[in-house]
Image (cartoon, rainbow, N blue to C red):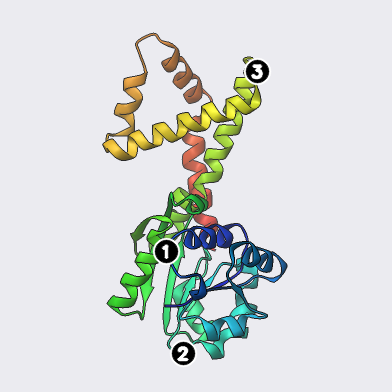
Amino acid sequence: MKIGFIGAGNMGAAMIEALVGTEFEKDKICVYGREKGEKLCAKLGIKSTKNEAVLANFADIIILAIKPAVYESVLEKIKYNLENKILISLAPNFSISRIGELCGAQKIVRAMPNTPAKISLGNTALCFSGVSEEEKAKIMEIFSVFGQTYEIDESKFAIFTAISGSLPAMIFNLIEAASDGAVRGGIAREMAHDIIANAVLGSASLCARTKAHPRALKDEVCSPGGTTIEMVATLEKMGFATAIIEAIKACEEKAKG
């Protein structure tokens, strides 16, 4: 199946680069993304198109990797080119029913990847409407290139956005703040970034691979009267857990539109 990307911003480019890095045939990938898209296509050796409608005619699967603000105008441009096509939306607050009303597409998939897709360590939520089991399996196979995939009910997309789609920004904030603390303690910025990113990666991997409860893993690090429990206590005094819970809730509400 031929795949077309409308949009080549941060998320679109991450997905395109990950896909090109696999055995997927380059001549079956096409991109429309203005100047940024053309540069990416030239760099990766894949096709670009002059407009959205041409891309929609080419592709069997059309991935909308564009900002929600331009969804309606783009769907208007391609709505007559969607017969038997699978339309995949990455927008956090466009429901399947709304997309169908705007363009008349019969085969619609909502997807919510995150930027670690660029290195095939992403999370993607998927919800399907009107696709066959064979088409569904193919889409799951494509998105598995970017990391883990989860089929979830559409009603859970807003909270998934908060705990996966947007969560990398929270982690990057954590790394930046911790590196400020490291610099304050005398470690050079570049080295601090490496050390902290490695600690985050290792901790997350330990949690994911062992399936142990995060509290149990935390307790393994916290010796009685030790340095780690002092850090944990300070975070709790500053409202660390409450701030994260409230941030997740705020993101979820925003994603509901």
Badge 3 element:
helix
Q: CA distance from mark 1 to mark 3?
A: 46 Å
Q: CA distance from mark 1 to mark 2?
A: 28 Å
Task: Name the side, left or right, on which 119 lies relative to 68.
Answer: left
The answer to whether 104 is drawn above or below residue 199 in the figure is: below
Q: Amino acid at mark 3?
A: Arg
The answer to whether 40 is drawn above or below residue 74 in the figure is: above
The answer to whether 136 is drawn above or below residue 224 in the figure is: below
- Residue located beneath label 1 in the image: 23
Q: Amino acid at mark 1?
A: Glu
Q: Nearer the viewer, residue 28 or 106?
A: 28
Q: Amino acid at mark 2?
A: Glu
Q: Residue at x 46, y 41 (%)?
A: 245
Badge 2 element:
loop
Q: Residues within 10 Å of mark 2 (few under 14, many from 20)?
A: some
Q: Nearer the viewer, residue 171 or 8?
A: 8
Q: CA distance from mark 2 to mark 3?
A: 59 Å
- The residue furthest right is 35
Q: Are marks 1 and 2 in contact (CB under 8 Å)?
A: no
